[in-house]
Image: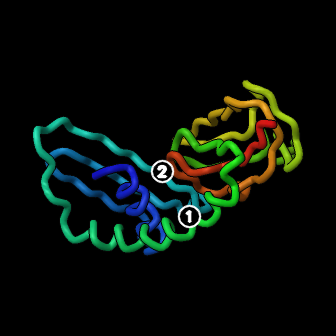
Amino acid sequence: MDVKEIQSLIKFVAKSGASEVKLETDDLKITIRTGALNSGSETTYVQQIPVAQAPAIPAVAPVAEAASAPAAKAETPAAEDDSKYITVKSPIIGTFYRKPSPDKPSFVEVGSTIGEGDVLCVIEAMKLFNDIESEVSGKIVKILVDDSSPVEFDQPLFLVDPS
């Protein structure tokens, strides 16, 4: 099971309304909890057990693949228009926050000039707040995620114009 299949499974579980789903195979153990009690945040635990060959995933996989197909088509036109920009992606799964705390201003806004090492946002994962720092210098062109939204690994967060 690759990262995209896991991400699709997370989306599927979140939309289904289930509060917790556990999936165990010979080489993979996944627990997905959707937080109806904690304002919609998701906590995901993935543990891979090394095995020579991976078994086929039961009936959950076709549903997850079907859910990921429309998302892939929707992202293609945006990628063509924004090819001159650098995309800052999420390094982890968690909840995206634009501010260090509710009473503070946002780290960056559209039009903000940033440098390498500047904090762009915070992602909460398993009750830990992780500062996400810029690896490039430039100007914020677009913020792709709403504040307090769940984000996935490698999900685009910002578009930066490096010029």
Q: Nearer the viewer, residue 81 or 110?
A: 81
Type of the residue with mark 1? Thr
The residue under the point 18% across, 66% down is 58
Query: Height in image: 99 above or below 147?
Result: above
Give the spatial CA distance, label 2 vs label 1: 28 Å
Determine whether, in the image, residue 145 is placed left or right of residue 25: right
Tell me if residue 16 comes above or below residue 27 in the rendering.
below
Disc 1 target residue: 76
Upstream in sequence: badge 2 or badge 1: 2
Q: Horizontally, is 136 left or right of 57 in the view?
A: right
What residue is shown with label 2? 43
Rendered position, 85 above or below 60: above
* Residue 55 position within the rendered picture, expressed as x and y whole percent measured from the top left: 13, 53
Residue 83 is situated, as x and y percent measured from the top left of the image, at: 66, 51
**Circle 2: element type:** strand
Using a 10 Å C-alpha cutoff, classify the residue at mark 2 as few (fewer than 14 neighbours), some (14 to 19) or many (20 or more): many
In front of the other: 86 or 149: 86
Point 43% across, 57% down: residue: 7
The dot on residue 40 is: none
- Depth order, front residue of 163/95: 163
Image quarter of residue 39: bottom right
Residues 97 and 144: in front is 144
Q: Position of residue 78 (x, y in %)?
A: 64, 62
Label 2 amino acid?
A: Thr
Residue 27 located left or right of residue 117: left
